[in-house]
């Protein structure tokens, strides 16, 4: 896994070092650079990604492990050059319309960034894996008893969800809550083939009940340690949710803010080794979300 990324001259990231853990949470206000960090690590590039659009600069993104360079991407004179062992990366900006959309029947083993292909991914799984996925989903969303892919005209099919209390009553994806659709997509990630080395997810909290945030973090941690899926997968989350912070470890969080002096992105970590840290934890009753909102950790508007 990657334990550090160094980014220079990429959009609002003038010169930053971002320590990474198996699960890393990027927290900050809108415009604080969270998406830019994800895009740099996951190699989502645009034409004019230079710091302040100065094309004379050289953009550099280095992925490191144990101090050793694993891979790099460098843009100079308008051209990108990649070297080293680039991770297979997947970024998710799940779109509810795409998650709910019918798919043309096909053998598909991954979803795209928007979540399109979810029905095909589910239908491609073996029956035991379909049953296990449906059972886990129904445990977390107990108003449903089963999930299936059912056909439509023209060779299409869609996901449907069976009512827990009335067997044989099935709900169309448009009748299922946003949070339920998102959770089902997250649960399906463990079955992607080939599995990525690294997944980046923007706003994973969107549409999810706070109870399910904890379940989501538990599931994502199992992805990182090999407890789910075919291999260990590193996960990067970008959020501005204080609720999500209640379920992560302080050492997993990176707080992003912009310098008032020159607009540079500043990346901070929770000062867990500082003598005053235990007192702060007691004062905020162990709530990392409240500590963040207080402004003492960085990464909130105005800081």
Image (tube, rainbow, N blue to C red):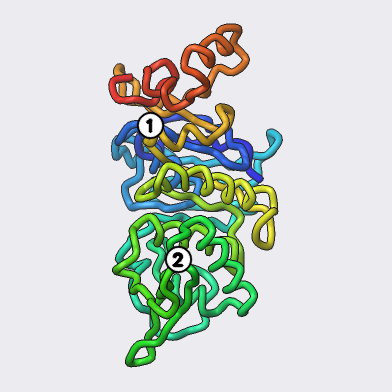
At numbered mark 1, what does the secondary structure look like: helix, strand or loop? strand
Q: Nearer the viewer, residue 63 or 201?
A: 201
Q: Quadrant of the N terminus?
A: top right
Label 2: which residue? 144
Instruction: Decide: few, some or many residues near mark 2? Use Cα within 10 Å; few <14, some 14-19, many ≥20.
Output: many
Q: Which residue is found at the position 59% from the left and 18% from the top?
A: 272
Above or below residue 229? Residue 239 is above
Q: Residue at x 36, y 48 (%)?
A: 206
Q: Residues within 10 Å of mark 1 (few under 14, many from 20)?
A: many
Q: Point out the frontmost of discs 2 and 1.
A: 2
Tell me how far mark 2 sits from mark 1, CA to CA: 35 Å
Of 221 and 255, nearer the camera is 221
- Residue 260 pos. (x, y %): 30, 18
Point out residue 238 in the picture as x, y percentages from the top left corner: 43, 41
Q: Quadrant where the C terminus lies?
A: top left
The answer to whether residue 292 is above or below residue 6 is above
The circle drawn on residue 189 is: none
Observer-nearest of 235 and 290: 290
Residue 196 in the figure: left or right of residue 205: right
Q: Position of residue 55 (x, y in %)?
A: 33, 42
Return the residue at label 1.
Answer: 28
User: Which residue is found at the position 67% from the left and 53% from the top?
Assistant: 232
């Amino acid at each position: 896994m990657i334990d550090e990324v160094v980014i220079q001259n990429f959009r609002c990231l003038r010169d930053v070092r971002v320590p990474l853990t198996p699960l890393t949470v990027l927290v900050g206000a809108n415009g604080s650079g969270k998406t830019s960090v994800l895009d740099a690590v996951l190699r989502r590039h645009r034409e004019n990604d230079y710091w302040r659009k100065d094309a004379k600069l050289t953009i550099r993104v280095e992925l490191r492990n144990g101090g050793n360079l694993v891979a790099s991407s460098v843009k100079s004179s308008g051209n990108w050059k990649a070297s080293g062992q680039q991770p297979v990366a997947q970024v998710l900006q799940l779109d509810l319309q795409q998650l709910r959309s019918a798919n043309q029947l096909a053998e598909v083993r991954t979803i795209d960034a928007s979540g399109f292909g979810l029905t095909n991914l589910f239908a491609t799984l073996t029956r035991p894996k379909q049953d296990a996925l449906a059972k886990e989903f129904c445990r977390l969303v107990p108003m449903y008893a089963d999930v299936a892919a059912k056909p439509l005209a023209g060779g299409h099919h869609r996901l449907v969800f069976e009512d827990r209390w009335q067997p044989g009553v099935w709900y169309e994806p448009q009748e299922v809550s946003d949070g339920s659709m998102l959770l089902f997509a997250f649960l399906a990630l463990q079955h992607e083939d080939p599995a990525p080395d690294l997944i980046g997810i923007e706003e994973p909290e969107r549409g999810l009940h706070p109870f399910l945030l904890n379940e989501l973090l538990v599931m994502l941690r199992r992805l990182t340690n090999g407890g789910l899926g075919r291999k260990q997968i590193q996960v990067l989350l970008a959020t501005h949710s204080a609720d999500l912070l209640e379920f992560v470890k302080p050492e997993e969080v990176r707080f992003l803010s912009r310098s008032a002096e020159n607009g540079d992105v500043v990346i901070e970590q929770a000062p867990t080794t500082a003598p005053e840290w235990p007192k702060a934890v007691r004062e905020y009753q162990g709530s990392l979300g409240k500590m963040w909102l207080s402004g003492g950790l960085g990464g909130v508007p105005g800081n």
